[in-house]
Image: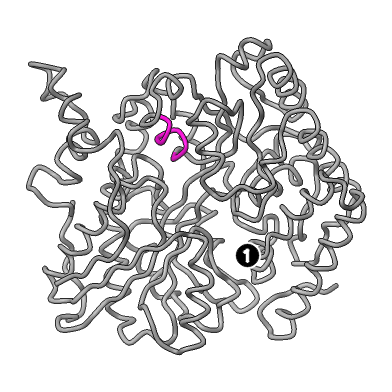
Amino acid sequence: MSEFRHHPFTSSSFSRRALIKRASALGPGAALVSSLEAFAAAGGRFPNGSATLHQSPPSIDISGTELKILQWHHFVPVYDSWFSAFVNEWGAANGVKVTLDLIDTGDIPAAFANEIDMGEGHDLIEHIEPLSKFEESVLDLTDLWEETSTRYGDAVNNCRLNSYNPTTEKYYAFCHGYAPTPGNYRKAMWEAVDFPDGPGTYDELLSGGTRIYNEQGIQMGLGMSPEVDSQIVAQAIIRAFGGAIQDENENVTIKSPETIEAVHFMKDLFTHCMTPEVFDWNAASNNQLLAAGQASYIFNGVSAYRNAQEADPDVARDIFFGTPLVGPAGPANAVSTAQAALAYQIPAYSKNPDTAKQFLLHFVENYEAAMLASLLYNLPAFPATAPGLEAALTNDPAGSEPPDKLLVLKDAAAWTVNLGWPGPTNAMMSDAQTTFILSNMMAKAAREEMSVEEAVEEAEKLLNQSADTWRSQGLMGGGQ
């Protein structure tokens, strides 16, 4: 038995009705409709009528228990509908009463903190980044990582590192998948300024973006606001210029000539290519700007593109993707954190931790279904669990034109790094994400509320304050 609580589901262009219409257009060739189209056309169901690909039996008796899940509204809405059916089927098959609560992703950290204070709440909590600052209040999931690695082989590096604290040697999270952050660009706009394949470097981003803004009146969509995408942008630019928030040993290193150069660059981007609205965005704003045809370039997962496919197919056909841009530090530093590091945590107050772990093992076993339901937004932590991924990226079953538009994501694991790279994903980085230290630094310099140097110094001070707190609790290394 399951209970599902969230806002009413809003269908997208990949709804059952839309995909049945598309499949019908194939006439006699309808049998060749791809697995994703057939899956979505059936309302997120496989040929047997189930949302579940593999009904994997639990290794222990969990019948009669409960499982309460809190997670974020997925950026691809059809995923939420599939997941509710999936978890309901698992609960029914195993005699587990399941409750699923969905809230906006930005509300997850505060909701989790509130439950920790109360000492009660959900058994599983998922966010789009690992909340490592809650490490002392969650279970060590080393046993779960060992079991999944035994079953499916090694996980991709960013997912493993986004779950592990080398100082405490604890797996405080289970990052089951990730959504990489490619560049999303409007091909026609960039062709008009002599970059038919979009920008490949930050110099090209500035020069081409400036021409597009001046000649076509279309701005760039790189945020500097208190939300997660703006944090991703700030980190990518800092790394590309050779800076780093911390080093491999968890010492704060943000105050450097390289970071100062990166912040100057972001200020130039704002001056030449953007408008003040980028200071007030939420996590959906750059998606909406792109889908409305009013952005030349953004950093985002494929959810922005999927939304554009629904809102304006003509715009969507003109959206293409590129790997992270190369800056002064060269190709080795052309990396990005995931737009979503899909991490579950089990709170220490959970009354059903074994049930939660059994569900996660079942979920990973069914990751091909999760990948399909997310319209290729969720990429697997364990590649063996989604053997159809490369074929889907080569010939996008959700109707990309050209069909291999998403093939750039094939090697995403190589250029997607953990939060905190080149150091570990620690509580200081969790603080930086939830208090928006880096995007605020960029915004204050761009708006000339502070000089670039002052903005970097303030960020350094805040990061060191956070680091000192967590080092004093034994949760973070460094300090030398």
Of 469 and 81, the residue lying toward us: 81
In the image: residue 457, left or right of residue 424:
right
The picture places residue 309, in percent across and down from the top left corner, at: 38, 29
Of 38 and 162, the residue lying toward us: 38
From this view, report whether residue 450 is shown above or below residue 271.
Answer: below
Quadrant holding the N terminus:
bottom left
- How many labels, in total? 1
Residue that extends furthest to the bottom in the rendered view of this protein: 119
**Which stretch appears magenta?**
303-308
What amino acid type is highlighted by mark number 1?
A: Thr
Q: Residue at x 65, y 76 (%)?
A: 167
The picture places residue 23, in percent across and down from the top left corner, at: 16, 25
| SS label for mark 1 | helix
The picture places residue 214, in percent across and down from the top left corner, at: 74, 18
Q: Residue at x 50, y 29 (%)?
A: 292
Residue denoted by label 1: 434
Mark 1 closeness class: few <14, some 14–19, many ≥20 residues within 10 Å:
some
In the image: residue 337, left or right of residue 236:
left
From this view, report whether residue 238 is shown above or below residue 129.
Answer: above
Q: Residue at x 77, y 33 (%)?
A: 269
The picture places residue 415, in percent across and down from the top left corner, at: 59, 41
Prevailing secondary structure of the magenta residues: helix
Q: Residue at x 58, y 71 (%)?
A: 132
